[in-house]
Image: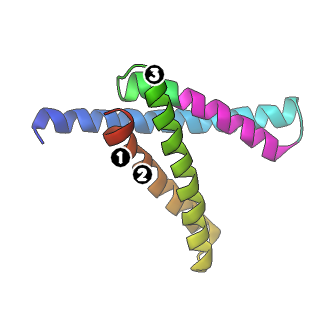
Amino acid sequence: MTSAEKNALIQRGLRFAVTGLFVTALHALVAVLFINLIADQPPLANGVAFAVATVVSYVINTTWSFSARLHGKTLMRFMLVSAGGFLLAMFVAWAAQIAGLHYLLGIAAVALTIPAFTFVLHNFWTYR
């Protein structure tokens, strides 16, 4: 890997991280607003917030983080990676619970593994 390729990878990774922080905050905001303004139903609120955050994440990551075009192929791949991340998050949390770890350690494990998993797949598959 050349120096220019390494720099581009680091730049994509940093943009991906900034996008992730923004989308996480957006998810929380949408969920809170939904609960307070529409219906006091946290599961439904989080489902709506997840959908909004996923769409926004796709648009920002495609156009900014990975400098690609919005396209059906990348959308399908993005959604598959997101679904894989969701399943992996559930598995990591389950494994932490089975191991007898405190739930906060499970959350930390999810927070550390899922972004890396999704970045690698997006970088080398979704946007290749």
- Which of disc 3 and disc 1 is earlier in sequence? 3
Q: In the rendered view, would you say 86 is above or below 32?
A: below
Label pair 1/2, CB-CB below 8 angstroms: yes
Residue at figure coordinates x 45%, y 20% from the top left: 70
**Residue highlighted by disc 3:** 71
Instruction: Count every numbered label the image shows and give the total.
Output: 3
Q: Which mark is residue 117?
A: 2
Q: Amino acid at mark 1?
A: Val
What is the C-alpha distance between the residues marked 1 and 3? 19 Å
- Which of disc 3 and disc 2 is earlier in sequence? 3
Identify the secondary structure beneath mark 3: loop
Segment colored magenta? 41-57
Residue at figure coordinates x 73%, y 35% from the top left: 48
> For residue 2, which quarter of the picture?
top left
> For residue 30, which quarter of the picture?
top right
How many C-alpha atoms fall within 10 Å of the one at disc 1: few (<14), some, or many (≥20)?
some
Query: Where does residue 78 sit, x and y in percent of width and height?
Result: 48, 36
Q: In the rendered view, would you say 110 is above or below 67?
A: below
Could you tell whether 63 is left or right of 109 in the image?
Answer: left
**Residue highlighted by disc 1:** 120
What is the C-alpha distance between the residues marked 2 and 3? 22 Å
Q: Amino acid at mark 2?
A: Phe
